[in-house]
Image (cartoon, grey):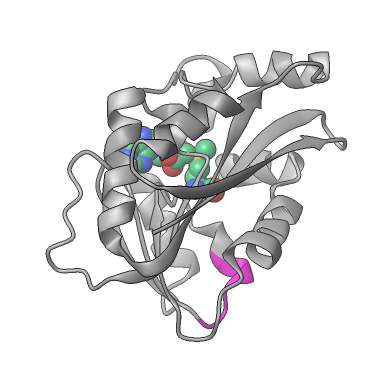
């Protein structure tokens, strides 16, 4: 569920979405996520759920990448920008099937859980678990409500398109329903104040 009226409607445009993300410091967040959480090895297979325009590929040169997203304009932009770097498809997590997909070393859901209600978020966890090889990892990152967070962060997060921003405990409880092993980290950004919850779940 996402709001697509007013200013937030502009974000349905892939290039405006990318420009807005860059303004919010998304490049350094993606770099940090790849270095500290994804830690990919050459040839690793990765599934990117809700891949958007797949800009994570700027930081993943040697990976076997499959991304899906329900937005046709985002997927068209991903195909235009990365014609030889990945496979892309249009789908929602609720409809995704893995019948034709081999198992993955990594699953990423970057900024997706906060668009999903609890039932859909649980489906994402189950899909990720099924898609992962034993020992493989799911990495998620989402805006988060937290005690003591900067008022500007709280203001911006309240106005996100996603209507299911949660506390770290609520994100963890969704992961716990499927994954036994998980760890997380609350990150307070300074450039434009914002709060993220990053989570790593191992199959
Ligand atoms: C904040 S954007 C993040 C996009 C991308 N992961 C990135 O890092 O730029 C959230 C994405 O989740 C996708 N999304 C929303 N609902 C979804 C669903 N039910 N299943 C899969 N993806 C969904 C949206 O289309 C959007 O591209």
- Res 106 visible: no
The spot of residue 165 in percent (x, y) is 53, 22
Q: Is residue 13 above or below residue 39?
A: above
Q: Which residue is found at the position 63% from the left and 26% from the top?
A: 144
Q: Which residue is found at the position 82% from the left and 32% from the top?
A: 192
* Number of marks drawn: 0
The spot of residue 130 in percent (x, y) is 25, 57
The spot of residue 95 in percent (x, y) is 17, 43
Question: Which quarter of the rendered picture does the C terminus lie within?
Answer: bottom left
Q: Which residue is found at the position 82% from the left and 28% from the top?
A: 193
- Res 109 visible: yes
Q: Does the magenta segment cover residue 146? A: no
Q: In terms of depth relative to the viewer, which is nearer, 85 or 46? A: 46
Side of 153 where 171 appears, left or right: left
Q: Is residue 112 above or below residue 156?
A: below
Q: Does the magenta segment cover residue 61? A: yes
Side of 42 where 132 appears, left or right: left
Residue 120, picture quadrant: top left
Question: Which quarter of the rendered picture does the N terminus lie within?
Answer: top left
> As drawn, which residue projects farthest toward the right?
190
Q: In terms of depth relative to the viewer, which is nearer, 161 or 9? A: 161
Q: What is the span of residues highlighted in magenta in the rendered image?
A: 57-62
Q: Which residue is found at the position 76% from the left and 45% from the top?
A: 25
The spot of residue 21 in percent (x, y) is 65, 42
In the image, ligand 1 is in what quadrant? top left
């Amino acid at each position: 569920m996402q709001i697509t009226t007013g200013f937030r409607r502009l974000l349905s445009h892939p290039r405006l979405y990318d420009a807005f993300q860059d303004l919010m410091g998304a490049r350094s967040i993606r770099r940090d996520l790849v270095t500290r959480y994804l830690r990919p090895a050459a040839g690793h297979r990765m599934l990117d759920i809700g891949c958007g325009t797949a800009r994570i590929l700027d930081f993943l040169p040697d990976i076997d990448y499959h991304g899906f997203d329900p937005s046709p304009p985002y997927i068209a932009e991903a195909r235009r920008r990365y014609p030889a770097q990945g496979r892309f498809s249009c789908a929602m997590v609720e409809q995704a099937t893995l019948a034709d997909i081999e198992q993955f070393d990594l699953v990423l859901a970057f900024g997706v859980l906060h668009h999903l209600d609890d039932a859909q978020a649980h489906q994402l966890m189950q899909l990720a678990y099924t898609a992962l090889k034993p020992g493989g990892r799911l990495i998620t990152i989402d805006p988060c409500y937290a005690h003591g967070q900067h008022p500007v962060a709280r203001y911006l997060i309240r106005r996100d398109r996603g209507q299911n921003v949660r506390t770290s405990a609520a994100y963890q409880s969704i992961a716990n329903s499927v994954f036994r092993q998980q760890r997380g980290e609350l990150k307070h950004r300074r450039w434009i104040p914002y709060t993220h919850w990053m989570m790593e779940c191992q199959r």
